[in-house]
Image (spheres, rainbow, N blue to C red):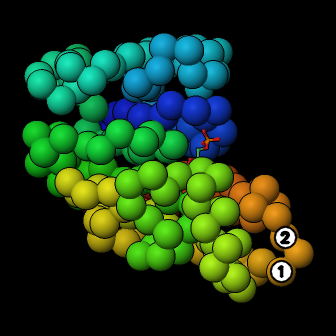
């Protein structure tokens, strides 16, 4: 049995898709939702699915390894970052080598790095006059958006598309592919 922890701090639409995707899977379970925001809507969503939650603060996350103890309780062996913006500390990267993935709403290596999230990414894509954008799912290392790329999918964008419209197209790709890519990684590692 694989036990996934999803890290999310926003709306949680990707987290919801992933939870739904694995709901009837006999060997893969979303067992924990981790957030750095006690008021994030994603927590309420996870609660409605009966998924346990753990809220972290900067001190516990960066100065202690407390979360590893929480993970032991839930037997977490895979981490999914789905709209989580904090840099992952070294102890966690090392404990989850090739077992932690992130989704980024652009075609890395372009439009990644610190501060490049959500609407800021789509604005930058628009300003650069790109003809396409897309999603990147990658393993996580100590740097923002730099781990090995596992999967990318792209969508066309037209000059008339606003950053919000680009964002909608990209989110559709995220919802379509993220859970399946996670499943494929887990199946191939077992
Ligand atoms: C997603 O678009 C994800 O790619 C992005 O945050 C959004 C979360 O949406 N992540 C980043 O920008 C990370 N750099 P959601 O809360 O609806 O899943």
Q: Residue at x 56, y 15 (%)?
A: 39
Residue 67: image location, x then y, percent: 21, 23
Label 2 SS: loop
Q: Which mark is residue 58?
A: none
Q: Is residue 133 above or below residue 88?
A: below
Q: Is residue 29 left or right of residue 20?
A: left
Q: Within 10 angstroms of label 1, few (less than 14), some, or many (20 or more) residues?
A: some
Picture quadrant where residue 30 is located: top left
Q: Residue at x 58, y 32 (%)?
A: 10
Q: Label 2 belongs to which residue?
A: 161
- Rounded to the nearest whole Å, what is the CA distance between mark 2 and mark 1? 5 Å
Q: Residue at x 89, y 75 (%)?
A: 160
Q: Label 1 belongs to which residue?
A: 158
Q: Residue at x 78, y 56 (%)?
A: 164
Residue 81: image location, x then y, percent: 42, 44
In the rendered image, the quadrant that contains the C terminus is bottom left
């Amino acid at each position: 049995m694989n036990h996934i922890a999803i890290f999310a701090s926003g709306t949680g639409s990707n987290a919801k898709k992933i939870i739904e995707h694995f709901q009837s899977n006999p060997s893969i379970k979303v067992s924990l939702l981790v957030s750095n925001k006690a008021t994030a809507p994603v927590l309420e969503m996870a609660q409605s699915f009966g998924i346990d939650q753990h809220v972290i603060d900067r001190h516990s996350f960066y100065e202690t390894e407390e979360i590893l103890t929480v993970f032991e309780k839930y037997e977490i062996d895979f981490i999914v970052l789905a709209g989580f913006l904090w840099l992952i500390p070294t102890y966690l990267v090392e404990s989850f080598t090739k077992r932690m993935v992130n989704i980024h709403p652009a075609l890395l290596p372009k439009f990644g790095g610190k501060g490049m999230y959500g609407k800021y990414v789509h604005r930058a894509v628009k300003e650069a006059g790109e003809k396409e954008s897309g999603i990147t799912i990658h393993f996580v290392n100590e740097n923002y958006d730099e781990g090995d790329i596992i999967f990318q999918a792209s969508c066309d964008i037209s000059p008339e598309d606003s950053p919000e419209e680009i964002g909608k197209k990209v989110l559709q790709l995220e919802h379509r592919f993220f859970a399946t890519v996670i499943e494929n990684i887990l199946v191939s590692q077992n």
